[in-house]
Amino acid sequence: MTDKVCLIIGGGRGMGAATAREMHHRGYRLVLMSPSDSCETLAAELGGVARRGKAENAADTQAVFDLAMQTHGRIDACLIHVGGPPKGDLLAIPDEDWDKAHGMILKPVIRIARLLTPVMQSQGGGSIVCITTYSAFEPSLMFPTSSVYRVGVSSFAKLYADRYGPDNIRMNCLLPGFTDSLDLPQKYADMSALGRLAKAEEQAKAAAFLLTEDSSYITGQSLRADGGVTRHL
């Protein structure tokens, strides 16, 4: 084990859980949060600690941050993976659903950055990674609120990287395509140039690359791990 600590928001299932396993394999101590007891089960398996909560709830993110600091006294890496926001036909989506999407996707990143930054400054650096979506730069009418607010996360990540790069704190976004942690029909696999869904473990390796010193000169970027779904150059 190393002395390094990884906090994972949304670390109970899917890509978050796969990233927890990958970071554990790399020697990081884990602090996990998810809405269900899945984070507690996984933390017990991997020798970490956990607290149930939702990213959109400021009190929950404060509590899991406090748990990490009380347990380990430091946080070296943080993955932020939030759930899917409301969907619908573009102009039929009510104001409250747009507000909910903002609260689920963008505000948690800003709140967590506020908590982490003084800690990472005192440590001499750190890495924050936000899992967003392939549609951040090619908006999809299938996911309107997600497309709008997740590109906002990429914009925030670039601004944050510019502001806190001198403190050796990095922030990047991972933009996954369709992944096997969701029960998706074949038509989504066919959208990939590879003709298949991503494995959650593949996304976890990409997330771990950005979370660790393997990517020590990469910041403010949005890395697409979408199997070639997007056409964006």
Image: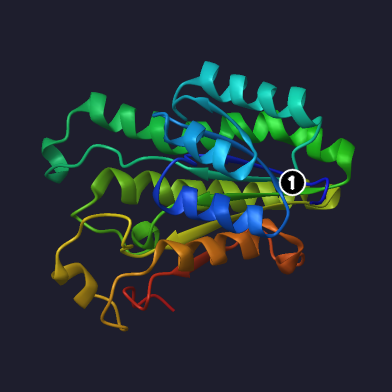
- Please provide percent x and percent y for residue 146: 32, 46
Q: What residue sits 67% from the left and 30% below the top?
A: 114
Q: What residue sits 74% from the left and 36% below the top?
A: 117
Q: Is residue 144 above or below residue 180?
A: above
Q: Dot 1: few (<14), some (14–19), or many (≥20) neighbours within 10 Å?
A: few
Between 172 and 208, the one lying in front of the other is 208
* Image quadrant in which you'd find residue 70: top right
| Count of labels in the image | 1
- Please provide percent x and percent y for residue 143: 24, 51
* Image quadrant in which you'd find residue 25: bottom right
As drawn, the residue found furthest toward the top would be 59
- Please provide percent x and percent y for residue 53: 46, 24
Between 159 and 196, the one lying in front of the other is 196
- Please provide percent x and percent y for residue 99: 32, 27
Instruction: Look at label 1 and name its amino acid.
Output: Arg
- Read off the residue under disc 1: 163
Q: What residue sits 19% from the left and 55% below the top?
A: 141
Quadrant (top left, top right, bottom left, bottom right) of the C terminus: bottom left
Q: Is residue 228 above or below residue 183?
A: below
As drawn, the residue found furthest toward the front would be 45
Between 33 and 158, the one lying in front of the other is 33
Q: What residue sits 60% from the left and 19% below the top?
A: 63
Q: Is residue 167 above or below residue 111?
A: below
- Left or right: 42 as drawn, with respect to 71: left
Q: How is the image coloured?
A: rainbow
User: Secondary structure under badge 1?
Assistant: helix
